Image (cartoon, rainbow, N blue to C red):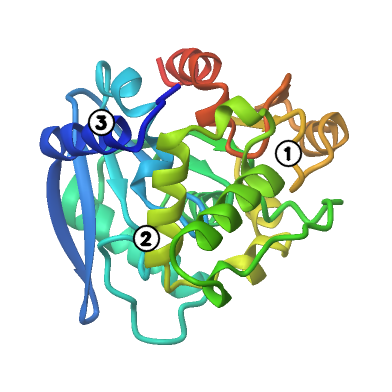
Amino acid sequence: MTDSEDDAQALLTHLEQRAESVDSRFGGARIRWRRIGSGPPLVLVHGGNGSWLHWVRNIDALAGRHQVWLPDLPGCGDSDEIAPPANLERLVAALQHNIADLVGDEREIDVAAFSFGSVLASNLALARGGVRRLALLGATGHGLQRRQLALKNWRLLEPGVAQAQAHRHNLAELMLHGPVAIDALAMLVHRSASERTRLRSKQLSHTDATRRALDRLHVPVLMAWGEHDPTASGAATAQAMARGRPERRCLVVPGAGHWVQYEAAAEINTLLAGWFA
């Protein structure tokens, strides 16, 4: 775990320097991507109120075998907002257009996605084709039971201590289960992404858009939720999503929350390395 904010910022600065920033466009909007590593292309799609840094603990492990492509989704991080409506169809079209521009329209790719990113990744695979394997972590858009959350609106609070306490509360309520996981790096990534997000993804996350897309796909799909993920119901969600679909592998990671690839990074990195091998 990262103990101090200075150490966390140094880690992010080093990662930013190693990753190549590449821009694509959709309509009049500039969409920022990062590229790192070499090998078969692997696209990593972040979650709602996030940025490419949702994958901060996974990039190095995956970039050893893949050319990893990481967008800031439209209206997130360093990317512009797309012209309204920023609905499912247009967000997927933006991703598809960017991948054609940067990676190649005909090139086979693998895709991993987190949380709300699963809604986009599953529908991207359906619209584009040419996706060899999918991995969906903490997937939303399943349309199944989820827990009611008591998140704090940090925007209504004074900057400084009050906002920091709200971000810590929200990390504990939604993202991470173990208090030790809420370290300086998690706080920095979460706070920065939250403050820069203009895309409102919650409504799409609460639909069954992921499940409907997957039911029309027949590619291998890995789905993993943390045991304590409030956006799902653990084994019940995994069993429901796997039922009758032998091409799917659905599992629960013990002890972890929603941001499973951060809290259980070592386990998820091994899982993804094997899945995309």
Whether residues under marks 1 and 3 lie with C-beta atoms below 8 angstroms apart, the answer is: no
Query: Which residue carries the number 1 mark?
Result: 229
Q: Which mark identifies residue 154?
A: none
Give above or below for 132 relative to 197: above
Q: Can you see residue 130?
A: no
Q: Alpha carbon of mark 3 to alpha carbon of mark 2: how far? A: 22 Å
Whether residues under marks 2 and 1 lie with C-beta atoms below 8 angstroms apart, the answer is: no
**Counting residues from the N terminus, which is met first, the one under dot 1 or under dot 3?**
3
Residue drawn where x is 56% and y is 67% of the image: 154
**Counting residues from the N terminus, which is met first, the one under dot 3 or under dot 2?**
3
Q: Position of residue 174 (x, y in %)?
A: 68, 48
* 74 and 263: which is toward the camera: 263
Residue drawn where x is 56% and y is 49% of the image: 118
Q: Which mark identifies residue 73?
A: 2
Q: Amino acid at mark 3?
A: Leu
Q: Amino acid at mark 2?
A: Leu
Q: Amino acid at mark 1?
A: Asp
Instruction: Tell me where residue 263 sits by quadrant.
Output: top right
* Quarter occupied by the N terminus: top left
- Local crowd size for mark 2, using a 10 Å CA cut-off: few (<14), some (14–19), many (≥20): many
* Quarter occupied by the C terminus: top left
Instruction: Tell me where residue 97 sits by quadrant.
Output: bottom left
Q: Could you say whether the residue bearing mark 1 is in a helix, strand or loop? A: loop
